[in-house]
Image (cartoon, coloured by chain):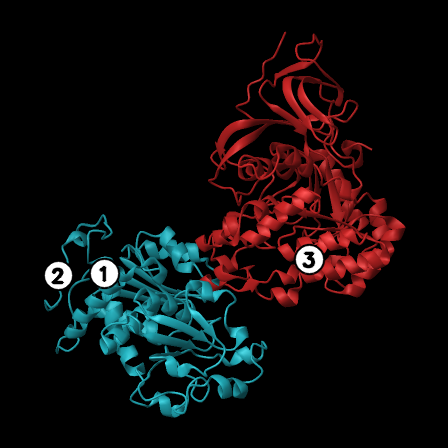
Chain colours: A red, B cyan
Amino acid sequence: MSLAEALDMRSSAGAEVVLRGATVLDPVAGIDGVHDVVVRAGRIEELVAPGAKLDGLEEVDAEGLHAFPAFFDPHVHLRTPGHEHKEDLETGSRSAAAGGYCGILAMANTDPTVSTPADVEALREAAREAACVPVGFLATVTRGMEGEELTEMGAIRDAGATGFSDDGLPIRSARVLRRALQYQRLCGGTIALHEEDPELSGDGVMHEGPVSAALGLAGIPSVSESTMIARDAALAGYEEGRIHVQHLSAVESVEAVRAAKAAGVQISCEASPHHLCLTDEEVRSLDPRRFKMNPPLRSESDRQALIEGLRDGTVDCIATDHAPHAAEEKEVPFEQAAMGVTGLETAFAALHTELVLPGTIELGLLVERMAGGAAPFDLERPSLAPGSEANVALCDLGAEWTVGEDGYESRSANSWCAGRKLTGRVVMTLAGGQVAYRLRSFSLGVAA
Amino acid sequence: MRHLLAIEDLDRDGIEAILDRAESFAEVGRRDIKKVPTLRGRTVVSLFYESSTRTSASFELAAKRLSADLISLKAAGSSVDKGESLKDTCATLSAYDPAAIVIRHPYAGAAQLVAGWTEAAVVNAGDGKHEHPSQALLDLFTLRRRLESLDGVRIWIVGDVLHSRVARSNLIGFQAMGAEVTVCGPPALIPRGIEQLGCTVSHSLERLGEADVVYALRLQKERMAESFIPSIREYAARFQIDSRRLGPRQLLMHPGPVNRGVELSGEVIDSPQSLMTEQVASGLVVRMAILYELLAAGPERPVHAAGEHEASPTPIGQPA
């Protein structure tokens, strides 16, 4: 099932377009070369030698631009229902499209939480009205995210939830998670886990280490995350359940996932662009708008461990944990500010700038991991192979831009990249077979 | 100096400039008329979101001694009680065109935020567990008067370092002035990684004899409920500074208020080695010096639109 079929979006006619002379890179499909990418009726019809005569297609001059399989983000907050002043389905999906995404999974920690079949159905219907990229919805594991009683996971799956997560909070009780994993055998649906031991995190607001010591801020120790991952991996192994660990941040966590994978546990995990690019040194600025999130930015050795995890496949995918917040929720002292940063519009550009250009990782690896978030939820991986649904991120790898100077597609401005100069920019996105985004300044060469 | 937000922002010369200025105010303090006209016609706002005795009283008296008009606000009973945000409070107060805002706040970075929202010079009178620069300056002033120089002086900071903004500012300030600092306390009350600030960490008072100065910190009794320590008695048994542990040539300091019988025994508080009364006295002249350096000294003086603010500062010592 294609992403447009499996998830929900505003439907319109499939794209009819040819990307002329694009440098096409899809490491998973084994494609790396300059082609005209021919898209008809929303599918990639073929990749042909540049210059072929084609009728009835919009011509896009993609010479010097890169065409990648569009990205998939399994972890975003669309804040709907309840917090539409931060984001909604329209602004959030536009933000995703601007970042080159062809699919996103929305978290369920809304107000009220997404905990019933009706909640899921209402959101899916809203997405069919408002979303410009395919959106999937996770439902909570426990009712109201209270950690006590399971939601009606079977009926919720029947209503079309992609999976389950209490993201924002850990599942404190090992018994409750075990029951959810047992129930998962009936209804499927990967359980995505925010791993944190609240007893160890306490009132922490940043990584525990020399920087928190210097700032007098309460620390969240790395072991708050890794001990819970170890517990939950053991439970998943025992129940043969399937779990996805969200936003890994610490070296101990990477090791815990690596060990679980080696032991045959059905476990996948994600890392966020901000954890891959930044360390807790940034918190010295005491700027919560850009640098306060949970899990917190950690040390350089943690960052290096995440990069190594990307390389060796321990980290399956990159997920932004796009967490929009209104200005007044961030214009307060660090300890009082809301946790979270936005990331959809900058993820590729930031990682290209910080990891690919300095030679830390290969471009192909970044492209692979940016689309790696679909598989853990049994969704079709975006691909440029002929016959695939058109999910394409067209990027200008040489474009330099300053984040925020032209505003954001997101309703919120708490980007961790705000003010940063990045190299590489998404200029056009095809998502779910439709043209979802064009950079305003990207001029199209339209042929007769 | 535009603001005083953190000791970390000052180098040794910057610290010494303030201490030297404080010396001249100490001289003024010995006169019959202790008031000088330096800040006449200028407004100082004192904005305290946390309770305070010494700090608020001495800043307010310092502003009055300098002839400033003073607006004193406590969070309780003000619009803060009604849910006004720090930013909005700041905008409201800025409408009075204050020359300086002295702020204490329960969260780190509050003074820095205010500095971004106002034209006034901002003085951090304590932000969360982060910094308390005027306390560090008054402690440095007190010690410098007693010892002349802090170079090579060994200072032990003993107690609840984790929850102490005084510990952080003093650690940085003492080291900036050439002292060697050891922090000492039970492991749960010493922040992980603090040694990267350049200090030594100890979990025992065994080698306290090496110290020239012992700086004890207040132990909040709530720490027991949060299981940082098993009991006050156990804490006192291992970490209380008493006459048995304090040598005759060692100086004792404490930022106040003291929990008698917890971090300090009664007899050391009243001993001649204790500098606690001097610390309080230093607080006034150092805070006068801070306001003076921010508002009346040097080329970086903030420029205001109103003409009378442009009058050149009256030299110290001219009667008001």
Residue type, numbered disc 1: Glu
Q: Residue at the location (48% across, 71% down)?
A: B163
* Mark number, residue B293: 1
| SS at badge 3 | loop
* Mark number, residue A195: 3
Distance of label 3 from label 1 (alpha carbons): 50 Å
**Looking at the image, is mark 3 or mark 2 nearer the viewer?**
3
| SS at badge 2 | loop
- In the image shown, does B200 or A342 lie closer to the viewer? B200
On the rendered structure, is B185 left or right of B124? right
Please give the chain letter of the residue carrying mark 1: B
Query: How far from the left and from the top, in percent, is residue A408?
Result: 54, 36
Closer to the chain start, of discs 1 and 2, is: 1
Residue A216 visible at all = no
Query: How far from the left and from the top, in percent, is residue A207?
Result: 55, 59
- Read off the residue under disc 2: B314
Residue type, numbered disc 2: Thr
